[in-house]
Image (cartoon, rainbow, N blue to C red):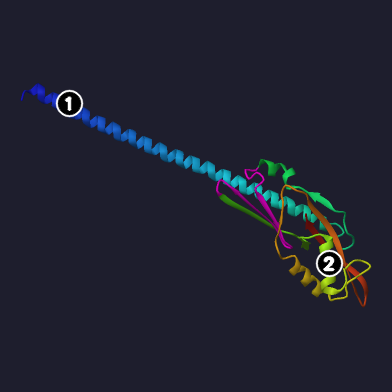
Amino acid sequence: MRSGEIRREKDLLKDDSAWADFLISKGALILASVIFFAAFFQLIAGFKDLEAQEQLEFLARDFKVVVDEAGAESFEREASEEFSYRFDENEIFRASPFGKNIEVLVSGEYVHLKAKYDEKSFSAVRPFAFRVLPFNESVLRESLHTEFGAEGCEDSPLTAELQEIKAFLQVSGAREVVLNAGENVSIKKELIYLKDSEGVSAFGCVLVYQ
């Protein structure tokens, strides 16, 4: 074989090797790009999930504050006028990715919001500062009358022991009640009267219902 042909063959082998190196480098670059963008989009999705969770936490906290404020002022001395709260009037609610798919559950101890977004479940719980009952005044008075023979209003005070009454209310309010986030939620502080040897006294609770 002549020297010129040998050189050409070596050059071809060198070119093939360089081309293979180029393809490997390009493949590695593409793979690295795929991994980078996958990680980037996963990071973005993580931020969106975090933002969605924070929005749900805000809504739960906002509702808790409103309920607590209903009972905070002169809590033991006087009842309050009924007022309404709407989740769907909150800007955070409207800006959240959940739409109207937020489930509101209220018990005597806490508010619990549940929602789904992008096939993921989110949850936020906030405890109330005051005694809460998830039903209206009619249900309250009827329950007290059934249990104690009196409605617990000013002209029909209860005569049972205070701790017995509070224990009954705790059990009565333990069940979670589902509220519609797209409708008015009524909030009202109510007084329960009881009579003992020292006279008539009262303690308060906050009613939350639709």
Give the magenta range: 96-119
Query: Which numbered disc flags the more N-terminal residue, 2 or 1?
Result: 1
Q: Amino acid at mark 1?
A: Asp
Reading the image, the residue beneath label 1 is 11
Identify the image quadrant of residue 145. Answer: bottom right
Whole-percent x, y for residue 19 in the image: 25, 30
Q: Which mark is residue 142?
A: 2
* In the displayed structure image, the side of residue 196 where residue 105 appears, left or right: left
Question: Where does the image place residue 81, in percent across and percent down from the top left?
Answer: 87, 54
Q: Secondary structure at mark 1?
A: helix
Q: Image quarter for residue 200?
A: bottom right
Q: Tell me, for residue 116, which label it has, or none.
A: none
Q: Is residue 26 above or below residue 135?
A: above
Q: Nearer the viewer, residue 191 or 69?
A: 191
Which quadrant is home to the N terminus?
A: top left
Above or below, 20 relative to 78: above
Tell me the residue at 74%/69% (across/down): 171
